[in-house]
Structures are given as C-alpha cells and as structure tokens.
Amino acid sequence: MLDQNEIYEQVLHQWIGPFVSLRSASLIAAGNHNQGIRLSSSEGDFFLKINFDHERDILQKEAEGLDMLRKATFLKVPQVFGAGRIGDYNYLLSEFIPSGRYQLDYWENLGLGLAHLHLSSASSFGLESDNFIATLHQRNREEDTWIDFFIEQRLEPLLGKAYFDRLIPLDFLKEFQTIYPSIEGIFPKEKPALVHGDLWSGNVISTKDGQPCLIDPAVYYGHREMDLAFSRLFGGFDSKFYEAYESVLPLEPGFETRMGIYNLYPLLVHLNLFGSAYLPGIERIVKRFVK
Ligand SMILES: Nc1ncnc2c1ncn2[C@@H]1O[C@H](COP(=O)(O)OP(=O)(O)OP(=O)(O)O)[C@@H](O)[C@H]1O
C-alpha cells in the first residue's frame, strides 16, 4: 500500500510530469470537509485539496468552477493542474498562492474584478451541469427566469432537505412557501450573470502582491446580486469594494430589502450543513415577507 507522500508524488507525476520529486507536504488547512496541503517539490509549490468522499466528484466540479472564473475575470484565480481520484482521495491540484499583506487597492480591485466577472452572461439561469456548494449538491437546471431558478433550484431543494432531515417542522416549511408569490416582483430584471456562488470573506485570499484571489467557488449563471448579498452575510467586505463594484455595475434601488431574500439560500446551506443554530435567522427573514 502507498503511503501518503507516495500518493502525493503520484498526483504530481500525473499532472506536472514524471521528473518532479516531492520535497515535503504540509497540512495548511483542515476545513470542515476537506484538507488543504502545500506540496513543495523540485518544480515549486502546489496546493492539493483532498477529501474522502467516495461517491461524488466534488473537487472535479470545483476545478471546473475555478476554470470558468479564470476565463471570465481579470482577478487572480488559482490555475488548476488536475483533479480526480487516487486511492480513497478525491483531489484537486492547483497553483499554490503564497499570501502577502493587502495592498491599498485590494478592495477596489476586488469590486472591479467581481463586476468584470458579472459581465459574463448566458441565455438562461443555471449551468450545463449540477455542482456543489461546500458538500451540498447544488442543482443548476436551466430556467428562463430568475424567480423560477431561485425557487426551484435554490430554495426548494434545501428546504425539502431540511424538512427531511428534521431540521424544520412542516408548519415552517409551509409558511416559508407562502412567501413565494410576494417575492416574485422584488428582483430587478437582469441578464443571467456568472457568479462566484459562495462569496464570503473566507473565499477570497490575498496573493503575495497583496491582491485578491478567488477560491472555492460554486459557480452558475444567476442574479449578480446573489454574490453581493452573500458577501454581506457574515460581516461584509470593506466599503471600497461596494463602491468600486457599483462604479461599473450600479445596483437597482431596494437592494437592502432584497438582500435577506437572496441570503435565504446561504442560510439554508448553513442550516443543512451545520444545524439549527441557523434557523432563527431564516425565520426572521421569512416573517418579514409573510402576508
Ligand atoms: N491555491 C491555494 N494556495 C494557497 N492556499 C490556498 C489555496 N486555496 C486555498 N488555500 C488555503 O486553504 C484554505 C481552505 O481552502 P478552501 O476554502 O478551498 O477549503 P474548504 O475546505 O472548502 O474550506 P471551508 O470548509 O472552510 O469552506 C483557504 O482559506 C486558504 O488559506
């Protein structure tokens, strides 16, 4: 049986070349579901993300998402070398991003770069295939309207899962669904925009040059305000980020009211992943929209 370093070296041989030799491997991130490992080699450093999911190609989908982001924005996104399975591991091998101190234009560039990303459009909301947000299956069946996509592909699957897993009672599931008609008219009509899909502060890291780098996406063509709402959920980004974004793509009036509705999705993600501590936040938003 191969030891861990031999497995890492095999991954390097497959994607970097037969000549590369591993010098060291160090665990730099032990997340909720994955491990992040810095591989130092004769060809430089690489970032290896692994998990032990036996059935699902979560990191293959993440690799595809990173590639889509890289093609659509001038922001830094790690280059992907490969993804797949070896032994029990599901892995993603990418460029290692050494970190540095934020430069003064960090937030401004992040705002401009996100706006650049959102200028990538498609003819419908969704994506050719499903992917994942953290370890949750994310449905992307294409829909012509944002409201249909948001309800059918985002809210309903996770609401149903939460009920099935006994995280919410039937009464609340029904109350939640009563708000659908009243939210129909609140979204500004916009073209589908390529979104990062999981845009919170932990998924933007600083490069050696102190510039923002996007990681860990859950991409699809959605309403661009999803990314902005999500970015405000856990503390928010610097105000320079929002100013720069709006200098390119201003928001329609009423975003503050709509924000809670968009954030029902990441809150449902958290409810399903981490449990009922996230339910009161969802209940508060739903109550505001119950007629
Ligand atoms: N390409 C990279 N180069 C260097 N470090 C990286 C790279 N990608 C991620 N990291 C580091 O690893 C950490 C975890 O990465 P990532 O968010 O992709 O993992 P995760 O398991 O999905 O995390 P979580 O469960 O917290 O969402 C990041 O916060 C960052 O510090």
Image (cartoon, rainbow, N blue to C red):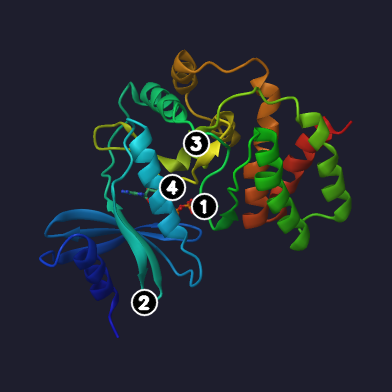
Of residues 262 and 117, the one nearer the viewer is 117
Determine the secondary structure under disc 3. strand
Sequence order check, earlier mark of 3 and 1: 1
- Residue 279 screen position, x and y as percent: 74, 47
Q: Name the residue tied to disc 1.
A: 129
Q: Nearer the viewer, mark 1 or mark 4?
A: 1
Determine the secondary structure under disc 1. loop
Query: What is the C-alpha distance between the residues marked 1 and 4?
Result: 17 Å
Of residues 13 and 282, the one nearer the viewer is 13
Query: What is the C-alpha distance between the residues marked 3 and 1?
Result: 15 Å
Sequence order check, earlier mark of 3 and 2: 2
Determine the secondary structure under disc 2. loop
Determine the secondary structure under disc 4. loop
Q: Is mark 4 within 8 Å of ligand 1?
A: yes
Q: Residues within 10 Å of mark 3 (few under 14, many from 20)?
A: many
Q: Nearer the viewer, mark 3 or mark 2?
A: 3
Quadrant of the image occupied by residue 42 = bottom left
Sequence order check, earlier mark of 4 and 3: 3
Quadrant of the image occupied by residue 117 = top left
Amino acid type assigned to the residue bearing label 3 in the image? Val
Q: Residue at x 39, y 21 (%)?
A: 108
Q: Name the residue tied to disc 3.
A: 195
User: Residue 41 vs residue 270: left or right?
Assistant: left
Q: Residue at x 47, y 24 (%)?
A: 238
- Residue 239 screen position, x and y as percent: 49, 20
Q: Name the residue tied to disc 4.
A: 216
Amino acid type assigned to the residue bearing label 1 in the image? Ser
Query: What is the C-alpha distance between the residues marked 1 and 2?
Result: 26 Å
Q: Is residue 264 above or below residue 270?
A: above
